Image (cartoon, grey):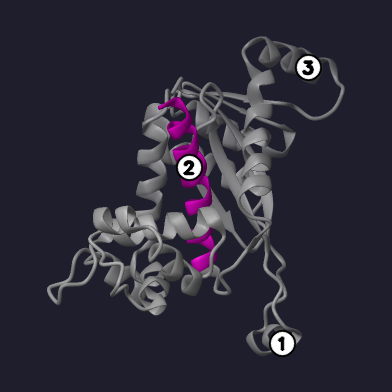
Amino acid sequence: MKSTQQGKQAGKPDSGGLAREAHIVAHCIRKEKGHSHAKLVDRLGLMPEICDRLGLHSDTLPDPTTFYHSLDRYAMYIWRALLRVSAQQLPQSGHVALDSTFIERQQASQHYLQRCGRRVKTIKATTLTDTESLAVLDVHCCIEREHDTKAGPRVVHRNADDLRSVAADNGFQDWNREYQVAALNVQYLVHYRGSSMMATANNALIRAKGYTQRWMAETTCSSVKRTQAAALRSRFWYRQFREIVLLFALNNIKKLARTL
């Protein structure tokens, strides 16, 4: 609750602290390179041009805890806004794909795991990916293994105004959810289970409508894991959620940098 309240006032404080964008860029650099907060400060000291743009002085850099606490101070909606803005810089076709992936939480000592009661080793992330540009539009994170039929439509509902069709595998197939998505004027291209005549005919029909592009969402998730992070560094779940959103925002930014 505290982090949400502080996140609403997360800008440049009256005391002369860093602006919000400086913190966000610093976290992008840290995550892209896989640095710790202490190493981030050391690396920034070797990049005077970056420091100038961020309003930093390379000889009087902030303490590493400044960046550590800013991840708490900026609420989740700020990181989601970064993800959304980064996706909007890339072409969007309105045709998207849903996919779920599991991201490992970095292993801590057994003493720490027992003390904090942490037994969950992975976090489930459900992504909404544009099939043309591979831009990730939204991410839904969950620790308690929320079923795809609940997580998928929730992500679609948040972005329904910009969507024309959604492709998903049979893990997202549910009649009630399919009607809910159809009510949003979004075509739900979900692969049906079984081998009945009805399921076979429906699957052939949705393949003709663009279902085969769904693999692009899997490609994006695989690329993020291979090029950026094999495991999450944060130990608290809410920081890990923000870290996951930042990972996919960085993926969008990298695609944008290549196009430039």
Q: Percent x, y for residue 245?
A: 49, 52
Q: Which residue is mark 1?
A: 114
Tell me the residue that label 3 is attached to. Answer: 198
Of marks 3 and 2, which one's residue comes earlier in the chain?
2
Q: Nearer the viewer, mark 3 or mark 2?
A: 2
- How packed mark 2 is, by other alpha carbons closer than 10 Å (few <14, some 14-19, many 20 or more), is many
Identify the main secondary structure in magenta.
helix
Q: Is residue 17 above or below residue 125?
A: below
Alpha carbon separation for disc pair 3 and 2: 32 Å
For the N terminus, give its image quadrant. Answer: bottom left
Q: CA distance from mark 1 to mark 3?
A: 50 Å
Residue 174 seen from this side: no
**Left or right relative to 63: residue 169:** right
**Numbered disc in front, either 1 or 3:** 1
Asked which secondary structure carries label 1, the reply is helix
In the picture, the quarter occupied by the C terminus is top left
Check disc 3 and give the amino acid type: Met
Tell me, yes or no, whether the two marked residues, 1 and 3, touch with CB atoms within 8 Å.
Answer: no
Q: In the orientation shown, which residue stands out farthest toward the left?
A: 14
The residue indicated by pointer 2 is 138
